[in-house]
Amino acid sequence: MEQKDIEQLAAEQRERAAEEIAKMQRELQNSHIQIKDSQKKLSEKKINNYFEELNARTSTVLIVIILIAILAGSYYSLTVYKPRAAYKKAEQFMQDGQYENAKAFFASLGDYEDARQKAMECDYRRGNYLLATGKYTSAVTALSGIPNYKDRDDLIADLAGTMVKTLDTGLSHSAFVRSVGTVKATGDNSFGQCEVDSWKDIAEIACGDNFTIGRTNGGHVYSTNGELDCANIIEIAAGGDFAAALTVDGNLHCYKDGVRASVSDVKHISADKNILAYINTDGNAVVSGAAFDLTAFTDLKEIETENGAVYGLRTDGTIVSTNGRLNGKTDIKHIFTCNDTVAAITKDNKMISEGAVPASELTGAIMLAGNTDHFIMLTDSGRVKYYGPSYAGSGRVADWSDVLLTPKKEY
């Protein structure tokens, strides 16, 4: 091949090589551009994803913050604001003498601050107010739920023995006076002794073996075995088969088998079975139905009879008795008798007893009454309890409450 041909071939090869190189450079440049575009798109996607994720996280955080704020607000409202507002409202009610409303608010607060203590204080203040205004039945109800609080037990003990008898039990029936002045009875009704539903305005009650008598606030006397022909009565009592009524001017009338016997200058009476006992205007005891040595029964303020015995309480707080039980005991405020037992409230408000019923069973007693082998009791809870055999339903007193409490006349 000639030199000329060789040079031409070489030139053509160089030209083709240059074209291939140029083509490759163009392709490489295009590849760079595509790579950059891909990188740009990838970067933009990453950025978008990042911001989307950031926005999502931000939204979640904001939602969490809002929820926390709502929960915190609710918690504050429930645990701080509302209880504090209710507490202040309750304190205002208590300050205004609206003790029941105040107690309801304090009770709803549970363990918040001293709410439980304040709820008891409401009962205590309400009880004191009711005592001061002479609403003794309601006072006992108010104080019943706070035993051992301040001097609550002393307040209750001060009522014991000072109230007119408004519950009693006969041989086989029991009766009590409601605070509204009506009477309820249960047990044997063979002699009509439970026919008391029509009685109104009753202030005092007494049960014989087979009859019931009641005194009204106006001094009239009802009896299930016939109305007694007397008026201006201030006190009544019942033995086994007789009734006694004391007038405002000191005349004592005793009714037995339709016959009335009377005596004057009397200031306090008591009866049980066949014994009628009373304190005369000189302060001495007089007893019919049994013979006793009554030499020591002087300067008396209370007298009780039970199961063939007589008990007296002197004005100096000393007990005298015909059977020796608690005889000579001093510092006594009041005496009770029931079920072959004499019980007493001491001046330091302790219950003592001697006989069939131990003092532990009489704790918290406000009123007692008994007959033979059973007795009935009004407790400091405002409820009635019955002990001993229940004859013909005489012990069905579990639902009895709201017993009328009225102070005895000072003798």
Image: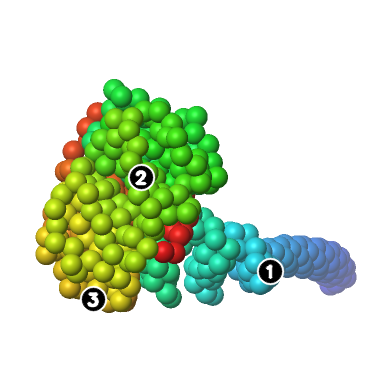
Amino acid on which disc 3 is placed: Thr
User: Which quarter of the picture shows residue 1?
Assistant: bottom right
State the mark number for residue 96: 1
Category of crowding for the residue at label 1, using alpha-carbon neighbours closer than 10 angstroms: few (below 14), some (14–19), many (at least 20): few
Residue mark closest to the camera, 2 vs 1: 2
User: Which quarter of the picture shows residue 295?
Assistant: bottom left
**Which residue is at the front of the view, 81 or 399?**
399
- Residue under the point 43% across and 54% down: 250
**Which residue is at the front of the view, 249 or 123?**
249
Amino acid on which disc 2 is placed: Ser
Residue holding disc 3: 330
Residue holding disc 2: 262
Question: What's the distance in space between the residues labelled 2 and 1, CA to CA?
Answer: 53 Å
Q: Position of residue 283 (x, y in %)?
A: 33, 66
- Does residue 362 appear to the left or right of 136 in the view shown? left
Q: Earlier in the sequence, mark 2 or mark 1?
A: 1
Q: Position of residue 370 (x, y in %)?
A: 25, 47
